[in-house]
Image: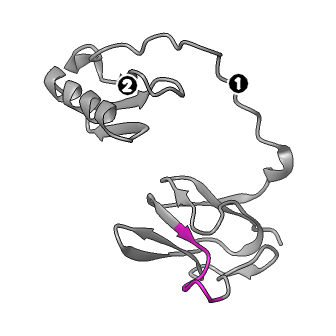
Amino acid sequence: MKLDEVRKLIRLVEESNIGELEVWKWWGRIRISRNGSSGNGVVVSGHVPHELGRPVMPAPAPSGPAPEPERQVADDTAGLTPIKSPMVGTFYRSPAPDADPYIEPGDRIESGQTLCIIEAMKLMNEIQAEVRGKIVRVSVSNGQPVEFGQTLFLVDEKS
């Protein structure tokens, strides 16, 4: 990515209400985010393969309090199979606002069964189970935005 393209992206983040912008290309990725809660300035970080040149600019040292260390995942998920989001979008547990959810914790599911809908770009995408077992946890609230690879459900395949 050329330096003038990066500058344009930085300007986009500074002039808009965007909190963070991440661009993935075949060569790597770059993330531009607002610096701190005040929103003054931006932080640019990323990964660019060495053969394409050095990163555009290093991320400055964070000012303010240090971020909390990542918490270890509780062992209550050990042995459970996560069903992850195949796309970015909005998570819906039912086919319509007044309809019952497709599944509830404790329900048994079969491979191919519809579990939820993810709306992406005004398209409703039914997400189907790839495993069979018992739903232990629904990890996302109805109407919540989800990211690619985010865990939606935890399934106990042994039940």
Image position of 11 with respect to 156: above or below:
above
Identify the residue at horizontal 29%, vertical 22% (top origin).
49
Identify the residue at horizontal 41%, vertical 37% (top origin).
20
The quadrant where residue 83 appears: bottom right
Identify the residue at horizontal 70%, vertical 24% (top origin).
69
The quadrant where residue 132 appears: bottom right
Q: Earlier in the sequence, mark 2 or mark 1?
A: 2
Q: Which residues are magenta?
A: 91-99
**Quarter holding the C terminus?**
bottom right
Residue 48 pos. (x, y %): 30, 23
Image position of 70 with respect to 154: above or below:
above
Please indicate whether residue 9 sits to the left or right of residue 152 in the image: left
Please state which of residues 104 and 131 is positioned toward the viewer in this rendering. 104
Q: Amino acid at mark 2?
A: Gly
Q: Amino acid at mark 1?
A: Pro
Coloring applied to the structure? one colour
Q: Which residue is mark 1?
A: 69
- Quick one: SS at disc 2? strand
Q: Which residue is mark 2?
A: 46
**Quarter holding the N terminus?**
top left
Please indicate whether residue 49 sits to the left or right of residue 85 in the image: left
Instruction: For label 1, count other residues whose C-alpha is less than 10 Å away and answer few (under 14), some (14-19) or many (20+).
Output: few
Please state which of residues 27 and 32 is positioned toward the viewer in this rendering. 32
Q: How many marks?
A: 2
Spatial separation of the CA atoms under disc 2 and disc 1: 20 Å
Residue 78 pos. (x, y %): 80, 50
- Quick one: SS at disc 1? loop
- Find the residue positioned furthest to the bottom: 99
